[in-house]
Amino acid sequence: MMLMLIESRPIKLTTRTGVSVDRTLPHKNLKTIGAWCFVDHFGPTKQTDGMVVASHPHTGLQTATWLFEGEIEHRDSIGTIQMIHPGQLNLMTAGAGISHSELSIASTEHLHAVQLWIALPKESLDIAPAFEHLDQLPTLEATGLKAKVLIGEFQGVSSPATAFTPILGVELRLEPGTHTIPLKSDFEHGLLLVAGNAEIEGQEIEVSSLFYSQSGPESVLIESKTGATLMLIGGEPFGEKIVMWWNFIGRTHQDIALAREQWNQRDARFGEFEDRIGGWIPAPDLPNVTLQPR
Ligand code: MN
């Protein structure tokens, strides 16, 4: 059984003003956890240092936005305008191509959120883009534990969110004490500490760090002195190599180069919308090497 602790690295995103994001996935030693391929944690920060992400594209993935504090307005090229609040899920399926913007609204004091990406399997890369907002998610309560199921199934409780591969995503709120969290033995899992303190399988973990467990175990032991909020993500090991560059996921260098070219030429593939920020984020230059599937 392989366990790994991934410390987060701060990323100052050119596409996001004011906010430094703590990233754990992808990591040089770990590309995916199930189909989860990107884990960013940001805040808590003052809302005035919030999130202003102008129009930018995606392909080949789903973005899952989950808030602990604050509010963010999402707009996209299929006509969605959706405010998101803590406890709700915004799930955008890029499929063949979509563009969107995210703007934190300065009406509440703090902003604290995660953004997670889910890679689409090969057969779903070309599907039409879609957007889901789920304001009521199934909750499970046990002694000292409250779980909200964002996607997939946890302990017999299923989310209605659309998933393309066997995965799960759960917000766990733990009271102080020792907790045995059940896992699916055919899934690999990650636990991101969002707030509070925790020791996972006897290992102390910092806020924004990600604890990884290969498939096999049927539970994980978490001890918390002060209580903790964690995101549990998991899935069947993703059976494909992917190319992930900037905001695009594909299978080959050509997939990425084409998406980049089409975005920068404002091709209809990515649609059009009014982003209320007045920006448009061009794709950077490709590196001078052929991108390799990993
Ligand atoms: Mn985005």
Image (cartoon, rainbow, N blue to C red):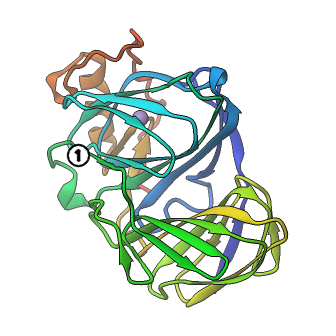
Q: Nearer the viewer, residue 113 or 237?
A: 113
Residue ID at (46%, 79%): 187
281 w.r.t. 114: above or below: above
Residue ID at (54%, 89%): 216
Q: Nearer the viewer, residue 94 or 109?
A: 109
* Residue carrying label 1: 95
Q: Nearer the viewer, residue 151 or 233?
A: 151
Count the marks. Answer: 1
Considering every residue shown, the one lying at the far top of the view is 278
266 w.r.t. 86: above or below: above
Question: In the image, 91: left or right of 222?
Answer: left
The picture places residue 57, in percent across and down from the top left corner, at: 33, 30
Quadrant observed for ligand 1 in the rendered image: top left
Query: Of the residues shown, which amino acid type is indicated by label 1?
Result: Gly
The picture places residue 76, in percent across and down from the top left corner, at: 28, 29
In which quadrant will I find the N terminus? bottom right
Please identify the quarter of the rendering in which residue 220 is found.
bottom right
120 w.r.t. 1: above or below: above
In which quadrant will I find the C terminus? bottom left
Please identify the quarter of the rendering in which residue 224 is found.
bottom right
The picture places residue 90, in percent across and down from the top left corner, at: 37, 45
Question: In the image, 231: left or right of 279?
Answer: right
Question: In the image, 94: left or right of 199?
Answer: left
The picture places residue 71, in percent across and down from the top left corner, at: 50, 34
Please identify the quarter of the rendering in which residue 269 is found.
top left
